[in-house]
Amino acid sequence: MVGQLLLGLTLLVGLHELGHMLTAKWFGMRVEKYAIGFPPKIFSKKIGETEYMVGAIPLGGFVKITGMVDESLDTEALKKDPEPYEFRAKPAWQRLIVMMGGIIVNVITGIVIFIALNYYYGETYLPASEVKYGVQPNQLGQELGFQPGDKIVALNGRPLENFNDVYSMDMLLDRGSYYTVERNGSQVDIPIPADFMDRMADNKERMVFIQPREPFMVGQVEPNSNADKAGLKAGDYIKSVNGESTLFFSDFQAAMQKYAGKPVNIEVERNDEIVALKATVNEDGTLGFYQKPLLEYATRDFSLGESIPRGTNQAFGVITANLKGFGKIFRGEVSASKSLSGPIGIAQIFGDTFNWYKFWSITGMLSMVLAFMNFLPIPALDGGHVVFLTYEMISGRKPSDNFLENAQKVGMVLLLGLMAFAIFNDVFKIIF
């Protein structure tokens, strides 16, 4: 988790600050320092007028541009008349582009990552037509109104084709969203309540509030596992556990949790014969084999021409989801403490195993989130500078250096407070 988090953040922060540095140098501004991470210093090298540094605290980075009121709060130089190479000596439109440089690079990075993922990996999905046996809701899904065997036929009145869309942020964040299911020969609408995201945050299974009822067979059996010792073999169909039917994998999982740490009688179908086995369930509710799903997943490849608009839409969909999420927080429909995550929460999203597709998907998402968060009109963020520069361009009056310095201090207090809240919130959610 830590390795993936540091790799992703280092890449994104480095590119973000590179956007500031390159645009500043393009307009002839002096860049004193380009840093990934915060002090203490691990490595630095001065090339020309710029010192390139790697810091020991890998949770951000910065670019020091001469004549700019930034997080360093180095205001001594501002008492002198501006030199031609200073940030403050340049036209407002050039300073605006420099402040937007990091955001623009993060947006481009996110778009490129999603385009590349579509082009290289395509899409593997479960067609809705394959979910022949309906869905299996967990407790959260049952609270929402789902029943075992419900077949989802439409989302917000639109026919369902890709089962993955059931979990889409558009469905979960839009106001007035609803599922239409087929139940006992009739159709029933299941509305999504405004506080559903809060309920999901309280649920350890989170997104998987429903899953397809999926027939399965035993896939790979782990050597020396309880499944191996019991005599399970690849290709077996597990028919029952202690007499309880396990036609679907969700049924089998429920039985394993029920009998965790206990011996069980298992009936399997092997070569058209029923074989009785005895096994001991692990304490974590597993036996030690990989299931082989029997629903047919579909794969779709995309040309570069198809990947460009698709990847772009996915990238900006991250920003749209963030806007909807903030809207729910401001309306009081979801709790900020349950919705916001810090470094620990982000690391948990990466998970403790490495997969290139998952890594780049999360990194692409974080790139767009970083762009969105930096565009917020908070002093000390790029968005705060953009607000002041826009005011200057419209009014023709530049805010005083003293005002900018004080605004920077206020912004830093807000950001440090938000970071402390996010980290404390991560720890609180782990403990409780």
Image (tube, rainbow, N blue to C red):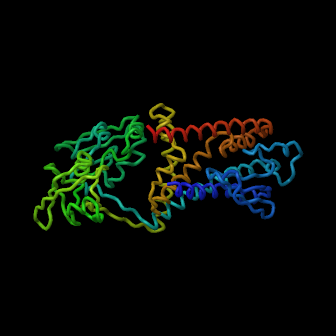
The residue furthest right is 81
Q: Is residue 226 left or right of residue 399?
A: left
The residue furthest left is 273
- Residue toward you, 42 or 328: 42
Evaluate whether residue 135 shows in this view. Answer: no
Q: Is residue 414 left or right of residue 366?
A: right
Q: Is residue 248 left or right of residue 143?
A: left
Q: Is residue 12 left or right of residue 332?
A: right
- Residue toward you, 118 or 30: 30
Residue 361 x %, y %: 48, 57
Residue 390 x %, y %: 70, 42
Locate the C terminus by quadrant: top left
Residue 299 x %, y %: 35, 65
Q: Residue at x 34, y 48 (%)?
A: 166
In the rendered image of this protein, does residue 146 appear above or below residue 226?
above
Q: Residue at x 32, y 39 (%)?
A: 140
- Residue toward you, 16 or 94: 16
Evaluate whether residue 117 shows in this view. Answer: yes
In the rendered image of this protein, does residue 352 appear above or below residue 77?
below
Q: Residue at x 21, y 46 (%)?
A: 149
